[in-house]
Image (cartoon, grey):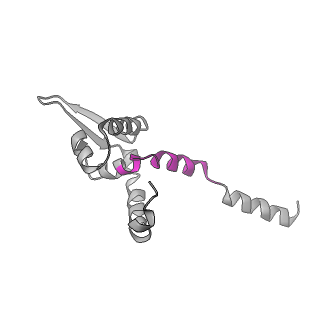
């Protein structure tokens, strides 16, 4: 194989999307998932407190997203018998492993994505 063909193939490989990264953005990019993980990074939180802290999310969507995050092994759901019964959500070790990446994304967004640049993106 010629050196030029090898260079083109190497360049193509380097530019190919990593499947793991595509899966990560597909999951974390789903509306609310990343926000919920970041909110839970501050510690265990109940459903009502999550709803208050994550403005604009409906109860049904919050329940769906928390269920997805639990199924993915990123969040645990613990029921504390009452009265009153309390449900607490908490990051697993796998969920906590995302915290540094979420903090980096937050820093990057503060520095590079002003609100006027993001208007109309929703």
Q: Residue at x 46, y 57 (%)?
A: 121
Residue shown at the point (34%, 47%) measured from the top left: 36
Q: 100 or 106: nearer the eye?
A: 106
Q: Nearer the viewer, residue 117 or 52?
A: 117
Please report the bounds of the magenta region as a residue range.
Answer: 17-35
Residue 115, given in percent of the width and then of the height, sits at: 39, 66
Instruction: Residue at 31%, 40% (x, y): give it.
Output: 58
In the image, residue 51 above or below residue 119: above
| Residue 95 pos. (x, y %) | 38, 46
Residue 5 found in image quarter: bottom right
Residue occupying the far front of the picture: 120
Residue 110: x %, y % from top left: 38, 68
Question: On the rendered structure, is 16 left or right of 105?
Answer: right
Q: Is residue 37 above or below residue 120?
A: above
Toward the bottom, the furthest residue is 111
Q: How many marks?
A: 0
Farthest residue, direction right = 1
Rendered-image quadrant of the N terminus: bottom right
Pick the residue in front: 94 or 89: 89
Q: Quadrant of residue 6?
A: bottom right
Is-magenta flag for residue 25? yes
The dominant secondary structure in magenta is helix
Q: Position of residue 34 (x, y in %)?
A: 40, 50
């Amino acid at each position: 194989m010629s050196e030029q063909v090898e260079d083109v193939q190497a360049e193509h490989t380097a530019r190919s999307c990593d499947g793991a990264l595509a899966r990560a953005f597909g999951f974390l990019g789903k509306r609310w998932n990343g926000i919920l993980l970041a909110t839970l990074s501050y510690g265990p939180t109940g459903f009502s407190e999550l709803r208050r802290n994550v403005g604009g999310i409906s109860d049904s969507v919050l329940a769906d997203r928390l269920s997805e995050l639990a199924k993915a092994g990123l969040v645990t759901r613990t029921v504390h018998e009452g009265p009153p019964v309390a449900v607490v959500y908490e990051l697993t070790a796998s969920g906590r492993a995302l915290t540094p990446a979420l903090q980096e994304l937050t820093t990057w967004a503060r520095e590079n994505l002003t609100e006027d640049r993001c208007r109309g993106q929703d």
